[in-house]
């Protein structure tokens, strides 16, 4: 099983890798930028909507670029890390073409077709990876630093979001647990676990918490999106948990609390 783990925040879909090799004489590969569009796409599990088109575009004016495309199953762990499984995606999609060589200013249409289950009880999440592949131009482009030769290779990866969505989907994020705790430095914290018991992912826009002390039910405080930056715009996939730790409200008695969570749904 092939698993990749990433800690990417919100909608950060592009990773630029800089690989520096000191003291080694070797060919320098193309260092080019391209883009993938659209970055978010919804598929139906059956019918016309089960096949979608994407475009990759070489924005260079003078160099070709090679691109490889593949899909990975996407999961978001309870601490917000993304975990990708390529093996679980290989049999569920047809992608054509999976590789392409683009001349300067050229673009290529990529067709992606869902081949998996036609009856789903909740939405499935994947990522379409479009990755620059190094090309050997048999040329040197070295930077000298302290008499060491540095060969610079820049690779670009775009990660588009794909959702396989049955009809009549919805999100329903609830508070699974809310606990008072002491942090590593002794600070008062509220550990919050949210569970999306719905059938689709959601971005938690404009979240708010109504927190009531169990010790003194007359003590209630409301936290708005400005005070919940760690939660605002967080993505919770269908049937998954997310854990968040926020400062415990200073005006509430320390201890057990009841929490009501509200948000605006964005798919």
Image: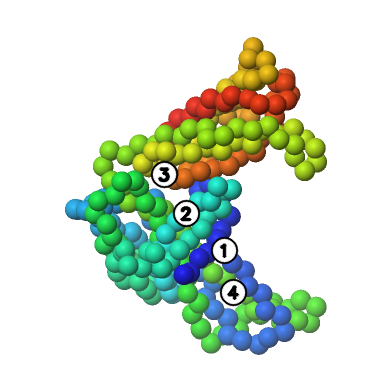
Residue tagged by mark 3? 238
Residue tagged by mark 2? 75
Residue at 29% in and 49% down: 120
Circle nearer the viewer, 2 or 1 = 2
Q: How far is mark 4 from mark 3, CA to CA?
A: 38 Å
Q: Are the two marked residues, 4 and 2, in contact with CB atoms closer than 8 angstroms? A: no
Does 147 appear above or below 91? below
Say whether residue 206 is visible. Answer: no
Say whether residue 124 is visible. Answer: yes
Q: Return the residue nearer the eye: 260 or 53.
A: 260
Residue at 42% in and 62% down: 72
Q: Which mark is residue 16?
A: 1
In terms of sequence position, does the residue under pointer 2 or pointer 1 come before the other? 1
Q: How far is mark 1 from mark 4, CA to CA?
A: 10 Å
Q: Are the two marked residues, 2 and 1, in contact with CB atoms closer than 8 angstroms? A: no
Q: Residue 85 placed where, x, y %?
A: 45, 63
Q: Residue 65 placed where, x, y %?
A: 44, 73
Q: How far is mark 2 from mark 1, CA to CA?
A: 22 Å
Circle nearer the viewer, 4 or 2 = 2
Would you identify the image quadrant in which residue 184 lies?
top right
At label 1, counting other C-alpha atoms closer than 10 Å, the crowd grade (few under 14, some 14-19, many 20 or more) is: few
Q: Secondary structure at mark 1?
A: strand
Residue tagged by mark 4? 153
Circle nearer the viewer, 1 or 3 = 3
């Amino acid at each position: 099983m092939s698993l990749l783990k990433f800690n990417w925040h919100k909608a950060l879909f592009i990773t630029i890798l800089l690989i520096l090799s000191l003291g080694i004489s070797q060919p320098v590969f193309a260092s080019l930028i391209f883009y993938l569009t659209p970055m978010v796409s919804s598929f139906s599990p059956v019918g016309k909507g089960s096949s979608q088109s994407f475009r990759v575009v070489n924005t260079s004016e003078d160099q070709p670029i090679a691109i490889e495309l593949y899909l990975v199953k996407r999961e978001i762990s309870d601490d917000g890390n993304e975990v990708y499984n390529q093996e679980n995606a290989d049999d569920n999609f047809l992608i054509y073409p999976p590789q392409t060589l683009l001349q300067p200013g050229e673009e290529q249409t990529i067709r992606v077709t869902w081949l998996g289950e036609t009856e789903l009880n909740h939405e499935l999440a994947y990522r379409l990876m479009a990755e620059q592949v190094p090309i050997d131009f048999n040329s040197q482009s070295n930077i000298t630093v302290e008499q060491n030769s540095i060969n610079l290779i820049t690779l670009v990866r775009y990660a588009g979001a794909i959702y396989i969505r049955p009809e009549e989907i919805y999100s329903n994020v609830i508070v699974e647990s809310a606990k008072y705790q002491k942090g590593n430095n002794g600070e008062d914290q509220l550990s919050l676990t949210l569970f999306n018991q719905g059938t689709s992912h959601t971005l938690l826009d404009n979240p708010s918490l109504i927190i009531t002390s169990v010790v003194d039910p007359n003590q209630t405080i409301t936290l708005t999106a400005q005070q919940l930056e760690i939660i605002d715009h967080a993505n919770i996939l269908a049937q998954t948990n997310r854990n968040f730790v926020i400062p415990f409200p200073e005006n509430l008695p320390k201890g057990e609390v009841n929490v009501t969570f509200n948000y605006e749904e964005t798919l």
